[in-house]
Amino acid sequence: MRKSQEFHVDSTRYLDELGKPLDDLPAQASDIERVVSAYRNMVLTRTFDAKAIALQRTGKCGTYPSVLGHEVIGTAIGQSLAPSDVFVPYYRDQAAHILRGVSLCELLLYWGGDERGSAWKHCPEDLPIAVPIATQCCHAVGVASAIRIRDEARAVVCCVGDGGTSKGDFLESINLAGAWHLPVVFVVINNQWAISTPRSVQSGADTLAQKAIGVGLPGHIVDGNDYFATIEALDTALERARGGKGGSIIEAVTYRLGDHTTADDATRYRTAEALKKAWEADGIKRLQNYLHQNGLWDANKEQALQAECKSTVDAAVEAYLATEPESPTAMLDYLFESVPASLQQQRERLAGKSDGGES
Amino acid sequence: MRKSQEFHVDSTRYLDELGKPLDDLPAQASDIERVVSAYRNMVLTRTFDAKAIALQRTGKCGTYPSVLGHEVIGTAIGQSLAPSDVFVPYYRDQAAHILRGVSLCELLLYWGGDERGSAWKHCPEDLPIAVPIATQCCHAVGVASAIRIRDEARAVVCCVGDGGTSKGDFLESINLAGAWHLPVVFVVINNQWAISTPRSVQSGADTLAQKAIGVGLPGHIVDGNDYFATIEALDTALERARGGKGGSIIEAVTYRLGDHTTADDATRYRTAEALKKAWEADGIKRLQNYLHQNGLWDANKEQALQAECKSTVDAAVEAYLATEPESPTAMLDYLFESVPASLQQQRERLAGKSDGGES
Amino acid sequence: MSSPEVRDVTLVEAVNMALAWEMGHDESVIVLGEDVATNGGVFRATVGLRDRFGYKRVLDTPLAETLIAGTAIGMATQGLKPVAEFQFMGFIYAGMEQIISHAARMRNRTRGRLHCPIVYRAPFGGGIHAPEHHSESTEALFAHIPGLRVVVPSSPQRAYGLLLAAIRNPDPVVFLEPKRIYRAVTHSVANNGEALPLDTCFTLREGDDVTLVTWGACVMETLQAADLLAEQGVSAEVIDVATVSPLDRETLLCSVAKTGRVVIVHEACRSGGVGAEIAASIAEGAFLDLQAPVVRVTGYDTIMPYYRNEQAYLPKVTDIVEAVEQVIAL
Amino acid sequence: MSSPEVRDVTLVEAVNMALAWEMGHDESVIVLGEDVATNGGVFRATVGLRDRFGYKRVLDTPLAETLIAGTAIGMATQGLKPVAEFQFMGFIYAGMEQIISHAARMRNRTRGRLHCPIVYRAPFGGGIHAPEHHSESTEALFAHIPGLRVVVPSSPQRAYGLLLAAIRNPDPVVFLEPKRIYRAVTHSVANNGEALPLDTCFTLREGDDVTLVTWGACVMETLQAADLLAEQGVSAEVIDVATVSPLDRETLLCSVAKTGRVVIVHEACRSGGVGAEIAASIAEGAFLDLQAPVVRVTGYDTIMPYYRNEQAYLPKVTDIVEAVEQVIAL
Ligand SMILES: Cc1ncc(C[n+]2csc(CCOP(=O)(O)OP(=O)(O)O)c2C)c(N)n1
Ligand SMILES: Cc1ncc(C[n+]2csc(CCOP(=O)(O)OP(=O)(O)O)c2C)c(N)n1
Ligand SMILES: [Mg+2]
Ligand SMILES: [Mg+2]
């Protein structure tokens, strides 16, 4: 006696690669102001990105992970999150951070080797950048548990890469989200690569969204270069989560248009053709086309925006470069709430050195 | 534009609770000898189990995990594995171990606190009992990788409990099995409990088999108290694996009829009713009924089998109780291939003590 | 609520009392782990808490230690004070990445913006005839991690007071409960919500001839050894380190200044155990005071044997006495 | 095949040469890890291996360290010799349960029936301006685990010879490569398949006045300090521990018997570092030889700062010289 149980995941896309609607657009398209400000954030993010890479190349910043190809997704996340929600990022979420209120200077400090880059003033509950892959997913379900314990109408967005979906932390966390009906939306940013490892090596499954099935969550795939598909999915998932209806997984499909980080050389493992093709699907250009086609944008506005972004970024760089390093004693001052007796001697030694000028 | 992708898991069951076929039986039912010997192994396992619990209660064995309710699944696993296959157990697989050639004395030594209980003579490639939950899953995919690297027509069966399906080790391993097309069959033994934690707390998914979907493996559910459903699924999955067609996940649904271990008291967290109901689905009784109904078994045979099992178990217990403990120096002798210079002094100290008679 | 002074309390009951006290007085305290709720924990350390404080504050988790460790971090950043249980220390390792890379670093990483007032509890140590992996004492792994406190109680009263302190501490504490003495003795415990200090050794017995330094279950054998030694006319000071990291070197060095001789006793294997740090610190800080080398009485450098041979592994009273005789002879 | 003597080889190239040699001579050697195949590793340690030895022997894994650690164990039980790479030591922690509970125990658990000839490689240590979590030196965590060897090369030739030894060793080895000196120097390396001994310190420089004990990248600063000290008329013996567990105490104690003074140098934070075990062992084993306390020059007891302040954390040549001056003064 054989019974069969069926499951599914849906995918959505609204715009073709040239920005032409393939279908009726979702409600989100009628909020013109929000759409335009999304576009503005994408351009700002890309401007920042290019500058950060340039700083690294000239020795003024450390290893930096380019956000090229992720701008649409991050922007949609930033827009869909309410201030009282909590964002749990990985390390390629610049677009979302900016909308959350992290300053460009803070971002530069972080990648420039200064812990103050995570002391975010404007989104104090957001989790900091997580470098160990997928570990942040556990924090996200922890935050969501706190929200549920206190019966609040808030939600959490947690980002993770395609590579990150292979790691236990992600897999255990989505399972908890399902088991405890937590208000958390996992956004799997499938940019096809984990450093040099292609998506196909990462998992034998056709899609990453289908991992949702195994934990009893809804799974949804969106074209991550399609602003409307992405923001609609996020708005829906977050509303659901805030309303106590549980979590979900959104696989946002895109392509990493840059090297993995400035320490990487992607030409070693991927073809110029694949990259060229991916650029054709670029979501910023696509949204720009859409705006043009609908009379919402023009060359003048574009020029003004570019100039504005450039000066915003330049100001941030200036502030960043003007920031003196912390005193070395900071390495002990923030370890615990107060410096334990046993560390006082080490702290004195450090303080002495930083006065003395040690080579 | 919305697309939908469909997935499914199937469930099978052939016998009702009274051992009556609900459907045409699979080919496995015509191998009478195998069916009867399956039954014999189930009874031996249950006899052993009762004795091990008794030994623990009288201080002659350590904490012991009863196999009650798992005998059908373990027996089917033991039968479907070829000698050249590799078995990767967890800690409640007595029925399978016996068919693999692990002696009852070895099993008692293991639970009786003696490492020689894992020095299995007759299945030297099988992995030992794994206590840290789900960790064995990684070993299973490692063994399967070795098989694939060498292009051998062998396969691996790996057991894990319903609780174990929440742990990263299992989840990462099934993903690798899918990505690398490994010849490994995961048997999730869903006995509804992980100590006191019910299946519903373990995951929000309806079934555990659907975790297969997220990794691109076939997932299949069987009634784990239905010998025919279980052996058919295993034979099929193993044949597939040995033939290079990749792995799969079988969720074998049963009920833990005993306490978690002899250190547990299940009455604290589950009702007598639920247990009573579970006993009605007992797979041994069910197969016995089937055999009776088909003229393959009778009261005399049963009596002879019971006597035989008792004397087999008694002999094993005798051998176990007669086994002198190892010399304490054994704790250093097997740590590395040879005792490093730095440990010689410690070894001498131990040797001196074991002569001297330390209190 | 129970009256302040409770009689006949075991160490594990004291753990339960401290949890109940603090949950009753601080809504932000949450208990999570495998089998902690309905079942009250496999050692009954959390028994009754679910009934008293409800299903939202006492949480049975799925079987996933990485998740337990990491979920507590997320909760903590929201101002909760999670007390997360690992069922046995042998199953804590999957949680190490979360503990090392996040719990211990969140405050430093964010320059104080977020912090992790978490207690990670785990029963630890051998000697109870348990199966493989149920007898670990790897406190040294955590003691080497900056940003963590590692605390080990050795009596019911200290379990109560130190656990309260650990929960109230705004930073992560790995709280290791010596299960060999979970029920070895009963004491009267004042259930008054008073915490004991962290980062401080407890001098359990004063003495002049030798300093015995230990923690956890070995406190029992060490005190017994001190009794035997007293009969031989040797006056032993017994120090319970209690917080094995960060280490209260001052108390240790003061004692050595008096006695000039030290024996360290721990159950963990010798090489790289916490005893190594203590011995190194004393040998460096009290070089001129020492009349004899600092000697360690410890487990062997091997895997805890299964139970038929576990007694051969564990440090014994006679081992301690012998070691003292050795250092006194010098 | 290349000629035996290869010139201008960096430490990371020596790692690559050893891997290539052994894969060429032993079919059972398998390389696995993240980005090790197509990309040749983020540090290029495995570059070219996929092309030479094929996709079945050089395997890109999914991003999962528990899996990497555990898959190697399963492979090893089948007679393969996996060399598993963790991309950085900061990402090894998710592998710890598998390494501690299984790789280190399989032989003992099965009384020799199965064993784990695995090498777990990881670049480690700071000083290269890397992001957070890319500068760990937590070798002490592994050195405390019975059943593991922990090996740290400090020159191209030792990287080559010790890695060959590690691969051939029938038990698990955690092989930590000091990435700060991955490309700091080039040496000629004899590519002749000859292994160096494990479990043995290397005396890099003989001396009479003080013994400097170190390993990994700090060997560089320690040798520089010895040069400076020589100018001051202080003759320093420099010992590269190389196998930090199990420890070759004999070589250390012999040296101390001669010099009577010891300074230990390591990058890891001080408390509970491998230096503690070495100091404790020397203080115990060479009590009467010691003219001065054993002093440790180490990283601070804190989290490795981000790179703007990492130099303030790292032990410096001047720190070593100062410490020697201090012990010599006694
Ligand atoms: C636990 C862990 N292992 C390895 C690394 C090294 N590493 C950094 S990024 C990366 C790939 C991540 O890929 P993905 O999750 O797809 O994110 P993407 O970089 O593509 O945005 C790896 C392996 C790490 N940071 N953490
Ligand atoms: C990593 C780990 N965590 C916790 C435990 C303690 N423990 C032993 S068995 C068990 C429940 C396992 O349940 P399940 O996987 O369903 O197997 P079952 O016992 O039901 O056969 C737990 C939590 C363990 N052995 N390993
Ligand atoms: Mg990616
Ligand atoms: Mg179960």
Image (spheres, coloured by chain):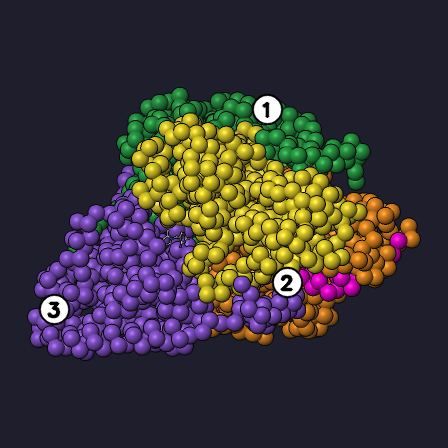
Chain colours: A green, B purple, C yellow, D orange
User: Which residue sits at x=75%, y=36%?
Assistant: A349
**In the image, which disc is placed on residue B290?**
3
Residue at coordinates 46% horizontally, 37% vertically from top-left? C188
Q: Can residue B115 be seen in this view?
A: yes
* Amino acid at circle 3: Tyr
Q: Is residue B179 magenta?
A: no
Q: Any magenta on residue D249? A: yes
Q: For the magenta stretch, what is the residue range?
A: D234-255
User: B190 or B245, which lies in front?
Assistant: B190
Mark whose residue sits in front, 1 or 2: 2
Residue at the (20%, 59%) spot, across then down = B223
Label 2 packing within 10 angstroms: few (<14), some (14-19), many (20+): many
Q: Distance between the residues labelled 2 and 3?
A: 60 Å
Asked if residue B37 is positioned above or below residue D317 in the image, the reply reads below
Pick the residue in front: A226 or D70.
Answer: D70
User: In the image, which disc is placed on residue A159?
Assistant: none
Residue C112 pos. (x, y %):
57, 29
Q: Helix or strand or loop: what does disc 3 sit on?
A: helix
**Which percent across, then down, holds residue B231?**
23, 67
Q: Name the residue under label 1.
A: A311
Answer left or right for B100 relative to B117.
Answer: left
